[in-house]
Structure formats: structure tokens, C-alpha cells
Amino acid sequence: MKNNLLRHVLHVIGYIVWAVLVNALAVWIIGPLVEDLAIFGVVAAVILIILWLTSLYPRYRRRFVTFTLFSLMLGQGLSALAFSSVSKTLVVSVVMCVGLFIAAIWFGKIRFFPLLFGTIAVILANAWLPFADWPFLTQFRIVQHSRLHIDPHDLDAAPFDVIHTPTGDALLTVSQYIPSKALLQQLVQTATDTPDALQNVLQTAQGEYRFVEIKRVGNRIEQVPASAADLAQAHPLNLIKSFFPFQLAHWYVANGELSEYLSPYLTSNQAVETAVNSASYATSMQALSNQGVQDELSNWQSALAQLGVKANPSGWRIEAGKLTGSYQGKALSVPVTATSVVGEGHFTSTSANQLLLVGNNDLQVFDLDAQKVITTYRGTSANPVPNDVVIGPLSHGGRDAIMVNAAPAYILTVSSSGTWQQVYTATSNSFRFETVLDTSNGPTQIITDDPSKIRNAPTRYFSSYHFVPGSAGKEGQLERNWRVFRTNVVNVTPITLTNGGGEDLAVAIYGSGEYLILHKTNVPVLPISAGLFCVIVIAGWVNRIRLRKGGGQA
């Protein structure tokens, strides 16, 4: 009696473990093989599946194959519902679970309780983290996984700006809300500052945004309303850059809170006239960009004044054609031709204090001691310089390099004499630099989104590389440190949530408001899962031989 009970318990536990493990194997091993190695990966995946199938005793093969398909379909279905509305998630989940449950019992002849507990295991695992995001677990611990309410027509992903607080960094971002009828009436009555103000209020009433901070509160990370003091530190253009300058941001204060809405910067006729005039397109866009920046910064400062604070963003910025900021305790304001600041670094030497600026199809290195631009890299009509640039050292403690997200992407360095050199060119036009992590442990990590080198598809995966210099004047190469087979990972932002704590990565998922905060770990998830699969296959063969000798009796 006790032996039978123990055997049934172990039987149920086996179903529970396999229900979760098969979903993990699908996203950690089978999926990456196919996605990265093309036809070679498909062949490898087929071999693994055949090894597993042949380890099953024929009498029980139908049952286990059915349960495997049941677990995979349930896991992927629940993962797709991760951020749907509560009502939709509840209704669809119940219908899906009941339908698959009945089909598994009818076709696979699976016993009720093993199937029930396997279903519960998949539901709980997916509730902890959707299976679509399990690829992150191969390299990271999930610090937080949540979602912001964002309309993809306004913002393609959750925007981030890092704010420094007394206890650690906070992520400033936006989340959509619907104004109440009373507030909407108030806004309509006060929409008199511009001729189209009333139209803008009415058009955006269903898609306005409020500022929130993602920060550590006690032992938890929470989304809280942004304080006026923290908003004063923000760089507003970091939060609205997705469609700039075609969309113009507006900010206003109501009931003590700062809100945002977007409106078209150009009328339809203006947009068409600008697009068809190819000879002056670049100049027109530059002028629009400059004017849009000034309009938005003026509006931002006015809105902050209503909150009783003054804009005081950290770092450097360009306003009204002047580079402004603070250096060695003194305010600095210097006329420049550039339009934006990428960041501060050491480009010509490790002791130099410099800024990288982006101008009209050029990159400029501004020396803070000399208070002037000391060298300029100019793009061409065939290979223009985009406004999407990342900076960071190629080796720990070395000079900063400039990583340009063009098509293809490339890396530039600047010599002590101001000479620019291209030291790396991506092999794919869809390769993209995200950020650089310079830690004291190991080589500098260049975080990227890049495609498979074998499979002919532009799909990009979240990856890390380190730079290997070339020899005899040749370009260097990037060697991979790790890859997470998760697509659409954007806005990768290093952040230290607690002073003195370790550095995390905040990432957004393109096309949604989903975001994650990740902490790098060295847990050998892939070897462990591969080892478990091998154990299961070997145990299956051993059990198959035993059953054959025993005449098929378990």
C-alpha cells in the first residue's frame, strides 16, 4: 500500500517536473538551435527529439508525447496572455485549459491527477515569469518584471531616464492614463495658449501620460508617482525621442501632477512638402529638429515652474545653440553648431575630459579644458551620421570609443592628434549597439542586439561581446561573451538601484510597455537543463530495457 502510494506520488512529481522542464528546454535549447543555426539547428533539434522519443517505451509513448504537447501549448498560450486585461486573461485561460485538458485526457489517455498537477505547475511557472521571457534566465536573475501602459502608436517602447536620488538610482518613465471628465472639462476651458490647443486636448484625451518612477522602496521595487524634485533632474527629450521631430510633446500641470500628451509637429501638407523637397530635406529636418527642441524645452521649463521647481538636469545639454553645463564647479555656456550631446568621456586620452556632440551629419569632440571642438568626424551622403550613438571604452580603463548605429554599424576611435579611425564594421545591417558595461571584473562588455551569423534573417537577439583589436592596421573583431535568445530588447539602461549595490540592467521590450530589471548571474542554467534532459533520456532507455525484460509491466 505504502509502496503504491509512494509510486503514485513520484509519478505525479515526474509530470510536474516535465511540464515545466519541457517549456524551459523549448526556449533555452530547441528554440536557440533553430534560431541561431538555421538548417543545422533544425537537424540538431530533430536528433534530440528522436533521442527522447526512442527512449519512451512504445506502450506509453502516446501518453507522454500528448502530455508534452499539452504542456507546450498551454505554456505558450499563457505566455501570450501575460499582459492582457484581467477579464480577457481569465476567460481565455479557462477556455484554453479546459479545452486542452479534455483533449489530453481523451486522446492521450492521461490520468486526471498527474494532468491536473502538471497544469497547475505550468500556470504557476508562467505567473512567476512568462515563458517568452525565460531566455533571460540563462544569464540573469529577474529583479523586476512589469508593464507600463503605453500606446505603441505614441511610443514604441518604455522610455527611460536615470534619476539620482539619495538612496540610489531611479528610472523615470511614463505610463498612460485617461483624464476624468471633470479634468477634461477643466483642460478644455484653459486650452487657449495656442490656436490648436483645444484640438490637441480633444485628440489626445484617450492617450495622455503621467510620469512615474521605478525605484526601490524598502525591500521592494515599485512604480510610484514622480516627485517634482526628481522631475527637475530629468532630461525630457530622453522620454519622447521615438518619433521626434514628427511628434511634439506638451506638458501641463493639473491637480499638482505633471502630464504629457503628443501631437503632430507638422500638418499633412507641411510633411508632404518637406518630404518631396529632397534637395533641402536634410537642412529642413535639421531646422525642424532645432525648433522642436527649443519649443519642448521651453514648454517643459514652464510646466516645472508651475510645480514650483526649476529644471536642473544633470550633465550637459544644448539650448538655443549653446552647450551648457557645469565643469569644475563653474557654469559653462559655449556656442556650438551641434544639436545634441551623446555624453562625457575620454576620447583622445584617458586623462582628457571631453564631450561627444552630434551635429548636422557629423560627430564633434568638445574638450572641456580648451572649451572648444578639437576634432570633427563628417559623414557623407552615402553614409550619413545618425543620431543614435553609444560611447564607452573598448578595454577596462582605456580611451572611450564611439559606436555608431548606422547600416552597417561601426566603431570609431580618436587618436591623441585628433585623427579618427574606424576599428570595427558590423557584418549585418541589422546589428545594433545598446550600451557598454565597464566593470573591474573581466573585459569591457559591449551590449548589442544582433542577428544570427548563419541564419539569413534580420531578427536580433540580446547579446554581449568584447573587442579584439586587429593587427597590422586591420579592423578588429567582436567576440561573443553570451547571448540571450530574446528579441525586441531595447533601451538597455545600466542602473544602480541602491547606493553601494551592484549594477543592474533595465530593458524594455519593443512594441509593448513591458520592461525588466536584470541582474547578471553565473548560474549554469543551460548545462543544468541539458544535463537533466540527458538524465531523462538515459533513464528512459534504462526503463525501456527493464520493461522489455519484464514483459512490458511497470
Image: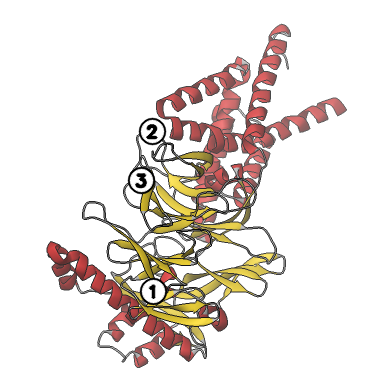
Front residue of this view, candidates 21 and 369 = 369
- CA distance separating discs 3 and 1: 34 Å
Local packing at callout 1 (Cα closer than 10 Å; few below 14, some 14-19, many 20+) is: few
Q: Which mark is residue 300?
A: none
In this rendering, position of residue 173 left or right of residue 224: left
Q: What element carries label 2?
A: loop
Residue at the (36%, 53%) spot, across then down? 420
Return the residue found at the far right: 2
Q: What residue type is labelled 2?
A: Arg
Front residue of this view, candidates 175 and 66 = 175
In this rendering, position of residue 423 left or right of residue 501: left
The label nearer to you, 2 versus 1, is: 2
Q: Which mark is residue 455?
A: 2
Front residue of this view, candidates 93 and 409 = 409
Residue 197's place in the image compared with 288, above or below, is below
Residue, disc 3: 430
Residue at the (53%, 73%) spot, across then down? 212
Could you tell me residue 552's position as x and y percent? 69, 12
Q: Which mark is residue 206?
A: 1
Whether residue 552 is visible to the viewer of this picture, yes or no, is no
Could you tell me residue 407's position as x and y percent? 31, 48
- CA distance separating discs 2 and 1: 42 Å
